[in-house]
């Protein structure tokens, strides 16, 4: 018996089919054991493909290789921090400092919009030319 079940839902008809075909049978089996279970429905976070495109040899790597404000190259992590602050927002620290809000909590759609903003800024302001990026 599996200890968890993950079902990705796309639309009403697919969701209903998945609930009837996967969730109901799963619950029928596991609820016989007398244990308590938690059912959580959450908006999907960014995908692995989005992460590869943004991190891997994708967007941030190409920005860190090409963008050199005042003649200095910066790491992918440095650029990520800049873009979080610019496009997601900031979180204030007790000492008055700030850090960019996390991108990990963004939904698939929100992360896609964030990446689009980063790419547009990098191309138009930093002069980055992107090549061989995975499809969005």
Image (cartoon, rainbow, N blue to C red):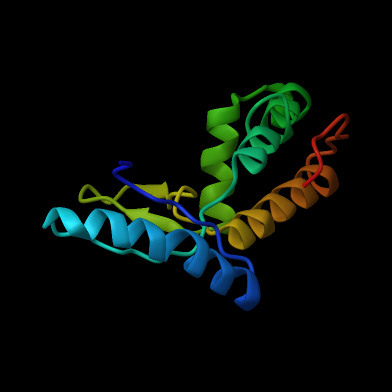
Vertical side of 80 occupied by 97: above or below: below
Q: Quadrant of the N terminus?
A: top left
Taking the view exactly as shown, the residue that stands out farthest to the bottom is 12
> Image quadrant of residue 92?
bottom left
Q: Does residue 57 appear left or right of residue 15 in this picture?
A: right
Percent coordinates x, y for residue 12 in the rendering: 61, 77
Q: Which residue of the protein is positioned furthest toward the left in this rendering?
A: 34
* Residue that appears at 87% across and 29% down: 132
Q: Residue at x 57, y 54 (%)?
A: 86
In the rendered image, the vertical position of residue 45 relative to residue 126, given as above or below:
below
Query: At which x and y percent is residue 47?
Result: 59, 46
In front of the other: 60 or 66:
60
Examine the rendering and report whether any part of residue 37 can be seen.
Answer: no
Residue 103 is left or right of residue 132, and the answer is left
Q: Nearer the viewer, residue 133 or 65?
A: 133
Tell me if residue 74 can be seen: yes
Q: Quadrant of the rendered structure where residue 9 is?
A: bottom right
Residue 105 is situated, as x and y percent measured from the top left of the image, at 44, 54
Q: Residue at x 52, y 58 (%)?
A: 44
* Number of marks drawn: 0
Looking at this view, is 84 or 12 the one in front? 12
13 sits to left or right of 33:
right
Residue in the foreground of this view, choosing between 1 and 132: 1
Q: Is residue 50 above or below residue 130?
A: below
Residue 89, position as x, y percentages in the image: 48, 59
């Amino acid at each position: 018996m599996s200890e968890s079940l993950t079902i990705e839902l796309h639309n009403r008809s697919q969701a209903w089919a998945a609930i009837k075909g996967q969730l109901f049978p799963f619950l029928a089996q596991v609820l016989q054991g007398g244990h308590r279970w938690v059912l959580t429905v959450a908006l999907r976070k960014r995908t692995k493909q989005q992460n590869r495109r943004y991190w891997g040899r994708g967007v941030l790597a190409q920005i860190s290789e090409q963008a050199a404000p005042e003649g200095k190259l910066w790491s992918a992590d440095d650029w990520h921090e800049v873009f979080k602050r610019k496009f997601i927002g900031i979180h204030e620290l007790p000492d008055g400092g700030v850090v960019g809000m996390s991108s990990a909590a963004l939904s698939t759609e929100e992360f896609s919009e964030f990446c689009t903003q980063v790419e547009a800024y990098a191309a138009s302001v930093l002069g980055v030319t992107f090549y061989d990026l995975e499809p969005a």
